[in-house]
Image (tube, rainbow, N blue to C red):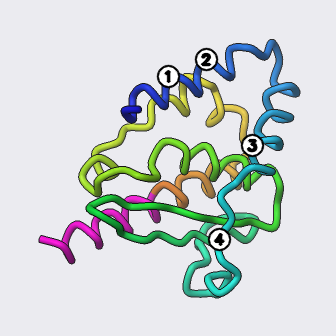
């Protein structure tokens, strides 16, 4: 599935819900299905700065693609990072770097997050793109 197809799928999933409480509950459910980071990566080295809650993000490079796993101490944050992983994991570094992530606006998540959670979302995106840049440079 292409990045755009994955974004479109997520948008259609969110269209099933009429109000934001249902969407928040869905994000919480997504958090329960997060590809969990190995415990050995739950260290300060993998902690994302700028998030209200603790978020650990690990990336590995296999066969030209970047794969992400993560964890958080906040269930809503787990759901948010899972939304990012669903779209960005298993992609080539350049595809991650170029991703506009328009689906986040289409589902309305940015406007419904508190300012601190919104900052955390931006920090997660930046960190995922930084991993992609690093792998791209390392494997030229």
Q: Secondary structure at mark 2?
A: helix
Q: Residue at x 49, y 29 (%)?
A: 7
Q: Which residue is rendered at x = 67% and y = 82% of the image?
A: 42
Gap in Å between the C-alphas at discs 1 and 2? 6 Å
**Which secondary structure, mark 3?**
helix
Locate residue 95 relative to residue 110 in the image: left or right: left
Q: Give the dominant element type of the magenta stretch: helix, strand or loop.
A: helix
Mark 2 Cα-neighbour bin, 10 Å: few <14, some 14–19, many ≥20: few
Residue wearing tag 2 = 12
Q: Residue 133 colored magenta?
A: yes
At mark 1, the secondary structure is helix
Q: CA distance from mark 3 to mark 2?
A: 15 Å
> In percent of the image, x 63 and y 26: which residue is there?
108
Tell me what residue is drawn at x 65 percent, y 58 percent. 35
Of marks 4 and 2, which one's residue comes earlier in the chain?
Answer: 2
Q: Residues within 10 Å of mark 4 (few under 14, many from 20)?
A: some
Q: Is residue 57 left or right of residue 139?
A: right
The N terminus is located in which quarter?
Answer: top left
Residue named by callout 3: 30
Disc 1 target residue: 8
Which span is picked out in magenta? 126-140
Which residue is disc 4 drawn over? 37
Closest to the observer, 123 or 25 = 25
Q: Secondary structure at mark 4?
A: loop
Mark 4 and 3 residues: CB-CB less than 8 Å, in contact?
no
The CA distance from mark 4 to mark 1 is 26 Å
Query: Residue 73: image x %, image y %?
Result: 81, 67
């Amino acid at each position: 599935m292409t990045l755009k197809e994955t974004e479109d799928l997520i948008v259609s999933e969110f269209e099933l819900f009429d109000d934001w409480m249902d969407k928040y509950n869905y994000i919480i459910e997504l958090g329960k299905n997060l590809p969990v980071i190995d415990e050995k990566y739950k260290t300060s080295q993998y902690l994302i700065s700028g998030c209200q809650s603790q978020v650990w993000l690990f990336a590995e490079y296999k066969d030209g693609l970047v794969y992400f796993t993560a964890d958080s101490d906040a269930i809503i944050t787990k759901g948010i990072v899972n939304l990012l992983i669903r779209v960005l994991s298993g992609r080539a570094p350049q595809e991650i770097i170029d991703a506009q992530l328009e689906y986040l606006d289409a589902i309305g998540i940015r406007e419904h997050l508190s300012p601190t959670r919104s900052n955390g979302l931006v920090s997660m995106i930046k960190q995922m793109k930084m991993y992609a840049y690093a792998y791209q440079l390392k494997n030229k």
